[in-house]
Image (cartoon, grey):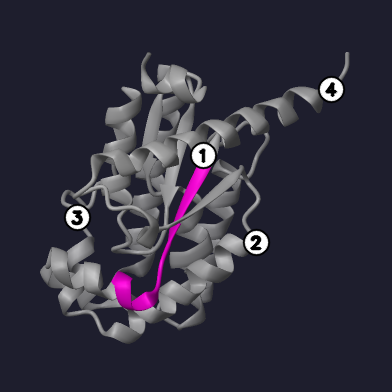
Amino acid sequence: MNAREKYGIPHDSVITVAGTVGVGKSTLTTSLAQALNFRTSFEKVEKNPYLNSFYKDFERWSFHLQIYFLAERFKEQKKIFEYGGGFVQDRSIYEDTGIFARMHYDQGTMSPTDYETYTNLFDAMVMTPYFPHPDLLIYLEGSFDDVIERIRERGRPMEQETPTAYWEEMYNRYEDWIDNFNACPVLRLNIADYDLLNDEKSVEPILEKIGHFIQQARKWRSSHLPVE
């Protein structure tokens, strides 16, 4: 029996992994996809033409960066559902507006005009009945100290040069954001409760929780379908 059958996870499920920078989204995405024999959808960090410039000058490049991410994530979302599901996705499209664009607007590194343009575009693309939302969003959480340590361990130069205050602001905004998120069901996982790098079997209880959440969500949706 494969993991999908064992835990009752439909073959067409779409699972999105969310959380602040450095919390382990890519590691969990890879582990879940391997266990479920799903495809992966990763954030295109290395090929992003704006990222290095953005870390050097937030105000100059924040709008360009967010538009790029929005376009890329929308294309990925479209591709995932055209395939018919069976995907684990690294970072959600909802974080772009709920965390990053809003943070730059509040801090004055994105102008009111640019922010309004961005949010109008996001709403037109995503906040409609026609946009396919994931079956489940897995939110990774942990202490701020653990997150900072992980950022330091992976050693990306542009992240090492970013002030700790920036990461702390982002961390706090994520905590507020997830408390009010309702676009799809949410499973919260604490990164201190598993160690996928050193214990492959620690993915098993995660799979069990995923199966339970998705089954309950699909039952709820089917019971609330409009009657013709």
Residue 103 pos. (x, y %): 47, 74
> Which class describes the residues within 10 Å of circle 4: few (<14), some (14-19), or many (20+)?
few
> Which class describes the residues within 10 Å of circle 3: few (<14), some (14-19), or many (20+)?
few
> Which class describes the residues within 10 Å of circle 2: few (<14), some (14-19), or many (20+)?
few
Residue 137, above or below 23: above
Q: Which mark is residue 111?
A: none
Most distant residue in the right direction: 228
Q: CA distance from mark 4 to mark 1?
A: 28 Å
Q: What residue type is disc 4 on?
A: Pro
Residue 153 pos. (x, y %): 15, 68
Mark 1 or mark 3: whose residue is earlier in sequence: 3
Mark 2 or mark 1: whose residue is earlier in sequence: 2
CB atoms of marks 3 and 4 within 8 Å: no
Q: Quadrant of the N terminus?
A: top left
Q: What element does badge 3 sit on?
A: loop
Residue that appears at 38% across and 39% down: 89
Segment colored magenta:
137-147
Q: What element does badge 1 sit on?
A: helix
Does the segment drawn in magenta span residue 22?
no
| In the image: residue 219, left or right of residue 186 | right
- Which residue is disc 3 drawn over? 49
Q: CA distance from mark 3 to mark 2?
A: 32 Å
Mark 4 or mark 2: whose residue is earlier in sequence: 2
Q: What residue type is disc 2 on?
A: Asn
CB atoms of marks 4 and 2 within 8 Å: no
Label 3 or label 4, whichever lies nearer to me, is 4
Label 3 or label 2, whichever lies nearer to me, is 2
- Which residue is disc 4 drawn over? 226
> Which class describes the residues within 10 Å of circle 1: few (<14), some (14-19), or many (20+)?
some
- Which residue is disc 1 drawn over? 209
Q: What residue type is disc 1 on?
A: Lys
